[in-house]
Image (spheres, grey):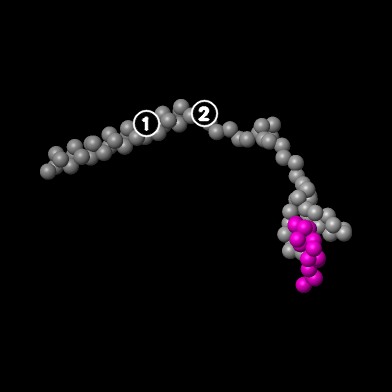
Amino acid sequence: MGKALFWTGVFFVVIFITRLLAVHAAKKRQPPPQAPSQANAPVTDSEAMVRCAHCGVHLPRSEASLIEQNTWCTPAHAKLGARPQD
């Protein structure tokens, strides 16, 4: 019984060491992760956000409708008019 436990222990130690070496080798093969630089980052233009006078939803100014000095998310909300402030 003692021999079986010994060889079982040796087997698991060998498996453990093999896995450690495999992980170490895999880390050596992969290049280190690079921090994203500002030069490679895509340039996105920010846009002003406006609020619909009826429902209060914020949307980009280019997607809003400007009617009678108010901004609206849809023409239907422009027809309904501004909602009174609470």
- Report whether 19 appears left or right of 1: right
**Residue 80 x/y as whole percent:** 78, 66
Give amino acid for label 1: Leu
**Label 2 Cα crowd, 10 Å radius (few <14 / some 14-19 / many 20+):** few
Residue shown at the point (63%, 35%) measured from the top left: 36
Residue shown at the point (58%, 33%) measured from the top left: 34
Badge 2 marks a residue whose secondary structure is loop
Question: Is residue 53 visible to us here?
Answer: no
The disc at residue 21 is: 1
Residue shown at the point (71%, 37%) measured from the top left: 43
Magenta residues span: 72-86
- Mark 2 and mark 1: Cα distance apart in space: 18 Å
Give amino acid for label 2: Pro
Magenta region includes residue 81: yes
Q: Quadrant of residue 72?
A: bottom right
Q: Quadrant of residue 25?
A: top left
**Residue 16 x/y as whole percent:** 31, 37
Please determine whether, in this image, residue 60 is positioned above or below residue 57.
above
- Nearer the observer, 50 or 27: 50
The quarter of the rendered structure image containing the N terminus is top left
Question: Is residue 81 visible to us here?
Answer: yes
Q: How many marks?
A: 2
Q: Could you tell which of marks 2 and 1 lies nearer the N-terminus?
A: 1
Badge 1 marks a residue whose secondary structure is helix
The disc at residue 31 is: 2
Closest to the camera, between mark 2 and mark 1, is: 2
Residue shown at the point (87%, 58%) measured from the top left: 69
**Residue 29 x/y as whole percent:** 46, 27
Q: Quadrant of residue 79?
A: bottom right
- Nearer the observer, 59 or 7: 59
The disc at residue 68 is: none
Q: Residue furthest right?
A: 68
